[in-house]
Amino acid sequence: MTKGGLQFCLLSFDRIFKPVVSKAIDVYRPTVLVLQCGADSLTQDRLGCFNLTVKGHAECVRYVKTFNLPTMVLGGGGYTIRNVARCWCYETAVLVNQDQEISENVPWHDYYDSYAPDYSLHIVPSLLENRNTKESLEKTKLQVL
C-alpha cells in the first residue's frame, strides 16, 4: 500500500469511525460498552474483503478506550486463523497498555510454522484498492449521524 493509501485509510478512520462512535456515546450515554472485534476485516482474510492491518484494527480498540467506560471486548469473525490470533494478541496488549512492550516476533509454539515466512505479529496490507472516496465517506457519515 502506498503512503498515500495508508494516509487515506487513516483519514477514513478519522472521518467515519471516530465521529460515529463519539456521536453514539453522546446520544445513548452508555454506562458500559461491548466491543465486538471481528477480525474478518483484516487484510488477507479468506472471506472478508477489507484491508485493515492488525495495528489499524487495534486503533478502533484504542479509540473506544478513550471513553473510559467499562468495556467487554469480544472476538468473532476472522477466517484466516493466524491473523485472527495476531489481531487478538495485539488488541489484548492495547487493552492492558502493553502494546509498546510486546514483541514484533511471534514466539515459538506448536503452530509456529503457520506464521511463515516472516513470523511477525503484524501483517502487511495487500495492494487492494480503497474504493471509498472522500465524498462517499462524507455522505455515509451524514446519513448515519
Image (cartoon, helix red, strand yellow):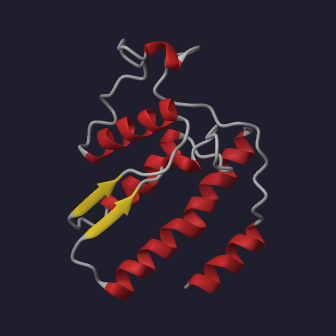
* Residue at 21% from the left image edge and 77% from the top image edge: 31
Residue found at x 36% / y 11%: 108
- Against 135, residue 7 (above or below) is above
Residue 30 percent coordinates (x, y): 27, 79
- Please tell me whether residue 64 is drawn above or below residue 139 in the rendered image: above
32 left or right, relative to 63: left
- Residue at 72% in and 38% down: 1
The residue that appears at 23% across and 71% down in the rendered structure is: 32
Q: Is 24 above or below relative to 88?
A: below
Left or right of 53, for residue 47: right
Q: Which of 40 and 89 lies nearest the eye of the viewer?
A: 40
Q: Judge whether 116 appears above or below 12 on screen.
A: above
Q: Residue 18: give x, y in percent of width and height.
A: 49, 67
Q: What percent of the width, then of the height, locates residue 104? A: 42, 23
Picture coordinates of residue 11 (x, y %)? 63, 59
Q: Horizontal placement of 6 versus 42: left or right? A: right
Quadrant location of the C terminus in the rendered image: bottom right
